[in-house]
Image (cartoon, grey):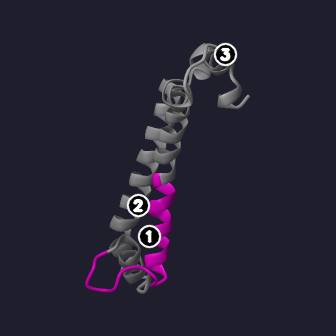
Amino acid sequence: ASVPHQCHVDAAVIAGAMPGRILFRHIIPLCWSPILVNMTMDVGQVILLASGLSFIGLGAQPPTPEWGQMIAEGASSFYSWWIALGPGLAIFLLSLSFNFLGDGMRDLIDPRSRMSR
């Protein structure tokens, strides 16, 4: 069921609460946690997207250091693979960390996941 049609929101409407009060006291608190979890889960995707764009040359220009550009420099020489290892590992660990953070926040916030334990 969508948030505006839940029982406690309907009860607030029947009780005569003003629309602003219904929005800020009943609807937004229910929407805030999924939005927060989604934001943390999407940070990893944004990091991968930005590094991918800088890898193909569509990111910041060469004086500005970017992880994707560093990987591209390391990928140009097959025998210098360690040049790409540091930025690649940093991208991997940071995006994985944000995904774990979002997953942990979902487990803490979502009441349905607590009931199944």
Residue range of the region highlighted in magenta in the rendering: 43-65
- Which amino acid does the dot numbered 2 rest on? Ile
| Residue at (49, 72) in percent of width and height | 52
Is residue 57 magenta-colored?
A: yes
Q: Are dots 1 and 2 in contact, CB under 8 Å?
A: yes
The picture quadrant where one finds residue 116 is top right
Disc nearest the viewer among 1 and 2? 1
Quadrant where the N terminus sits is top right
| Figure label count | 3
For residue 40, say whether it is visible. Answer: yes
- Label ID, residue 91: 2
- Which one is nearer the viewer's eye here, 52 or 84? 52
Reading the image, the residue beneath label 1 is 51
Q: Nearer the viewer, residue 111 or 56?
A: 111
Residue 9 pos. (x, y %): 63, 21
Residue placed at 55% from the left, 25% from the top? 18
Of residues 19 and 80, the one drawn nearer to the viewer in this rendering: 19
Q: Residue at x 41, y 74 (%)?
A: 68
Decide which of 23, 62 is in the foreground and name it: 23
Q: What is the C-alpha distance between the residues marked 1 and 2?
A: 8 Å
Q: Specify whether 95 is left or right of 7.
A: left
